[in-house]
Image (cartoon, grey):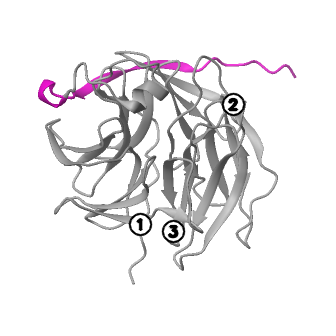
Amino acid sequence: MMFVHTPPAVKTAEVFTEMPAHFRRTGVHSEWADANRGGEAVDSFLEGPVFDARGNLYVTDIIFGRVFCIDPKGQWSLVIEYDGEPNGMRFISETDLLITDYKNGLMKLNVETAKLTPYLTRRNSERFKGMNDLVLDAHGNIYFTDQGQSGMHDPTGRVYRLRPTGQLDLLMDNIPSPNGIVLAPDEKALFVAVTRGNCVWRGPLMADGSIVKVGQFFTSYGPSGPDGLAMDQAGNLVVANPGLGYAWLINKRGEPVVVIKSSREMMITNIAFGGKDNKTLYCTESGSGSILMAGMPEPGMPLHRMPAR
């Protein structure tokens, strides 16, 4: 029997909303852009999309330490601006966001009061390389990536698990730029975007909490590899690829089945499921400072919050 490869379907993500002009920092120099954008004067860099229970979308602006709230009609408001470089976010309660901040570590933000407090800034008195993204499981464990400036030249990026007891487990320490992170629906495997390796790793999680037989699940291409990740309820993985301006929908075999292309610039950095039926994919398109959206075949996995105590 001959196997016939079916090319992935292609769709284009439409613009949901764009950052208003009065929030853009045009022509402003930043240390972050010096290190990550070749010194280009970038007016914003959107990341970390996550929805609250009322359908509001929260995003970060890494460069200028800002968190924005975008309502269901696409209207923007500034929640906070502070001395940090916020990236990934997850709600841990109805009002509290946990933020992976490259500069400060894990931070907690109350979106109603705009109160920002440290959550985990150091490990045994040592600073982290530079946190990037996070995911919570059903038991309140927090998995997060510590990316820093790691890459193929320095494969020392790390993945940690912070347990509800406060115990911090180092799961992997040999990754060339760990970025987005997500769990399989049954929480028996962890997926990590490896940006500089241009791939996604899959690590089975054992009953005792250890991780084994980590392998390369999906291989991409282009100038910049996978960034943000999301999972749908059928077990398909969504991979944002800013170097191509794509978001890939990958099945359980690691095969691309849908390619979602940007309708703006080529900089889809991160993704989140939302909308009335949770079947709309929202993408941060950081080149244009806009949010794109595309319909998906399956609803996204609901995001866990901290168990009630």
Label annotation for residue 119 = 1
192 vs 161: above or below: above
**Residue type beneath disc 1:** Tyr
Q: Which residue is mark 2?
A: 197
Q: Earlier in the sequence, mark 1 or mark 2?
A: 1
Q: Earlier in the sequence, mark 2 or mark 3?
A: 3
Residue 19 lies, in percent from the top left, at 21, 29
Quarter of the image that includes the C terminus: bottom left
Residues at marks 1 and 2, CA–CA distance in whole angstroms: 30 Å
Tag nearer the camera, 3 or 1 = 1
Q: Tell which of 300 and 96 is nearer to you.
A: 96
Label annotation for residue 138 = 3
Quarter of the image that includes the N terminus: top right
Indicate the secondary structure of the residue bearing disc 2. Answer: loop
- In which quarter of the view is residue 43 placed? top left
Q: Quick one: label 1, few (<14), some, or many (20+) residues within 10 Å?
A: some
**Residue type beneath disc 2:** Gly
Residue 100 lies, in percent from the top left, at 44, 52
At x 45%, y 22%, the residue is 37
| Residue 270 appears in view | yes
Q: Tell which of 182 and 301 is nearer to you.
A: 182
**Residue type beneath disc 3:** Ala
Tag nearer the camera, 1 or 2 = 1
Q: Is residue 178 magenta?
A: no
Residue 9 lies, in percent from the top left, at 53, 20
- Report the magenta residues as a range: 1-23
